Amino acid sequence: DVKVTQSSRYLVKRTGEKVFLECVQDMDHENMFWYRQDPGLGLRLIYFSYDVKMKEKGDIPEGYSVSREKKERFSLILESASTNQTSMYLCASSDYRARSYEQYFGPGTRLTVT
Amino acid sequence: KNEVEQSPQNLTAQEGEFITINCSYSVGISALHWLQQHPGGGIVSLFMLSSGKKKHGRLIATINIQEKHSSLHITASHPRDSAVYICAVYYGGSQGNLIFGKGTKLSVKP
């Protein structure tokens, strides 16, 4: 059974804190993605990675960075959290060799920045 | 910019009703996905379509490539179908990036 896990379901942080969100997949997928989801805006891509140590900016990368040191792990970093980063964060992975381009999602982390 | 439009944004139905959710996109695609998100956040894939029609239980998905339109139908709806349904399209490229619609929130009342 395919599995994408995220380090926390709920997280509360203070403005200015450095925040790490971790994502791990056990499917040996090359591609990994970080999204944020806000009411009325849907899923928006923050960053994606198609290989270890490779990363590409998505639609809304400002205020975020990522790290992919191992194939199974993709981390999202908020360098200095701000209240407008309060959101649901979803990680996903996909197998680039699969023509379906199906993405497998983690359960999400609901982050609140106060 | 490639756009994916879903309608309606919100939908309330009585148990047993036939439900249709629509998705339109702006340019040619390689694949279209229908996803389901239950309260609590987890997203699961329901269907992947590149042409025609697929059926799984009470769910039916269709796609019309010429009209750039897809529909998700739910027959004999049930309260457990209450969820957000999301359409996502793949336009091409090796990274497999999907473009997502904003979702349709379905509530099925008993």
Image (spheres, rainbow, N blue to C red):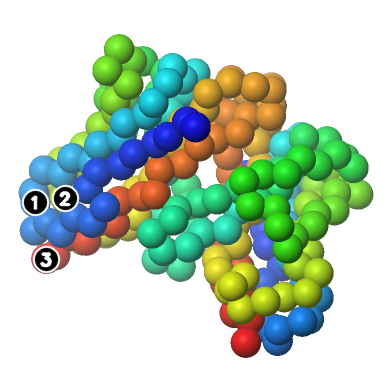
Contact? badges 2 and 1 (CB < 8 Å): yes
> Which residue appears at 44% of the width and 56% of the height?
A41
**What residue did someone put label 1 on?**
B16
Residue that lies at the very extreme toward the top in this rendered image = B66
Sequence-wise first label, 3 or 1:
1
Contact? badges 2 and 3 (CB < 8 Å): no
Residue B57 in the image: x percent, y percent? 27, 37
> Which residue appears at 80% of the width and 54% of the height?
A66
Residue B59 in the image: x percent, y percent? 26, 37
Q: Amino acid at mark 2?
A: Ser
Left or right: B110 in relation to A90: left
> Which residue appears at 60% of the width and 62% of the height?
A89
Sequence-wise first label, 2 or 1:
1
Residue A10 vertical placement versus A61 (above, below):
below
Residue A53 vertical placement versus B93 (above, below):
below
Q: Amino acid at mark 3?
A: Pro
Element marked by disc 2: loop
Front one among B37 and B96: B96
Which dot marks residue A103?
A: none
**What residue did someone put label 3 on?**
B110
